[in-house]
Image (cartoon, rainbow, N blue to C red):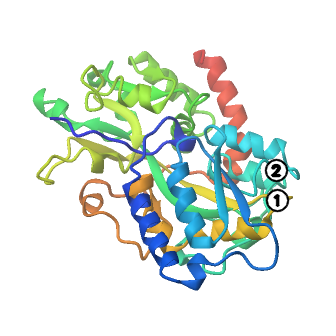
Amino acid sequence: MKPAISPTSGSRGSRMRRIGALALAVAALSGCAAGGDAQAGSQPAGGDAKSVTLVVHSSFPNEEFAAAASAATGYDVEVISAGDGGELTNKLVLTQGAPIADAFFGVDTIFASRLIDSGAVEAYAPEELPAGAESFAVAASGDAKAARVADTGLVPVDFGATCVNIDTGWFAERDLAEPTSYADLTKPEYRDQTVLLDPTASSTGASFLVGTVAAFGEDGYVGYWKDLLDNGARIEQGWSDAYYGQFTQGGESGEKPIVVSYASSPAFTVNESGDASSTKALLDTCTRQAEYAGVLTGAANPEGARAVVDYLVSNEFQATVPEAMYMNPVDETVALPEAWATFAPEPTAEQAHDLSAVKIEQGRETWLRTLGDEIGL
């Protein structure tokens, strides 16, 4: 029997999330409040503003988070959705100064610098920011200084990597060597085996595009995509269509043993005995990303917004990230599920094909337009 997989999407396309960890957090935090924990159950200090609104990408577990955050902060937290990461960014930029919420979560590396450049984010960093978070700080476009979270207000919450995944059993059954690199996907022996995501419609696809720009350069990435298509690669609109509809380990009807997914995906195709996974991420095809939160400029309740952002990087919430979000928490003290170490290692800096958020912002629209013109997206 194939184990079901539910890796993240939100800003990366359609994805499902396990919400049990957040439900447990709600129960624990509510219990603390009922037991008289003054900090967990207190009302916000100094004013009548007891409500705060968080806007998120479309797959965030809204109700579960709202209950947990309300219990933890003492504010009445409302969570609203605003599409995927690109749509969320657009709405925050267009409403700069008169925002649709007090705080946000779910803008990722692909759109991070754009959000900073727009002035939509208040410069703020939680006092209890996890030590690992600063390594994901991003700068505004054209800013040559080393970035700090406090300078930009983009607070890293979680991180992961977009990677090519393969069905290992499919290759073993055919006595065919597994592909290991970008270049392998264009070889004749892997013809008609790959499913990609449209980078103009999916930010998981856009992340894969960034990786190919990093690997082949701005003069070579279009040629690489052409080679992929010439070798029979199929392009789907979103992650669910690709993984569940086309990938041989995602659904009963899938015929493609190679798919763009995430480094964490193989941890969710582990067998019942827990000693093997039916899939593998190719760590030489990965592009790393972080997801950010922040306080919106002009927020009706900036104090409440800061409290919610503080909660997103608190140990209580960070501990739920692997199971609820299928991402890595920025809090390095949080223990990851046992299966992750074996089946879902993250790519190293040497393996990953990364570009800075500033470089992505400077080139993203040109790369997408050029690729669309050249291959007809």
* Circle nearer the N terminus (2, 1): 2
**How many marks overall?**
2
Q: Residues within 10 Å of mark 1 (few under 14, many from 20)?
A: many
Nearer the observer, 64 or 261? 64
Q: Is residue 117 left or right of residue 314?
A: right
How far is mark 2 from mark 1, CA to CA?
A: 6 Å
- Quadrant for residue 306, please give it: bottom right
Q: Which residue is mark 2?
A: 99
Residue 320: tell me if it is visible.
yes
Residue 349: tell me if it is visible.
no
Quarter of the image containing the N terminus? top left
Q: Residue at x 25, y 58 (%)?
A: 339
Percent x, y for residue 68? 52, 63
Q: Is residue 302 left or right of residue 197?
A: right
Q: Residues within 10 Å of mark 2 (few under 14, many from 20)?
A: many
Percent x, y for residue 28? 42, 71
Percent x, y for residue 20? 37, 55
Nearer the observer, 306 or 69? 69
Nearer the observer, 37 or 290? 37
Q: Which residue is mark 1?
A: 299
Percent x, y for residue 31? 45, 74
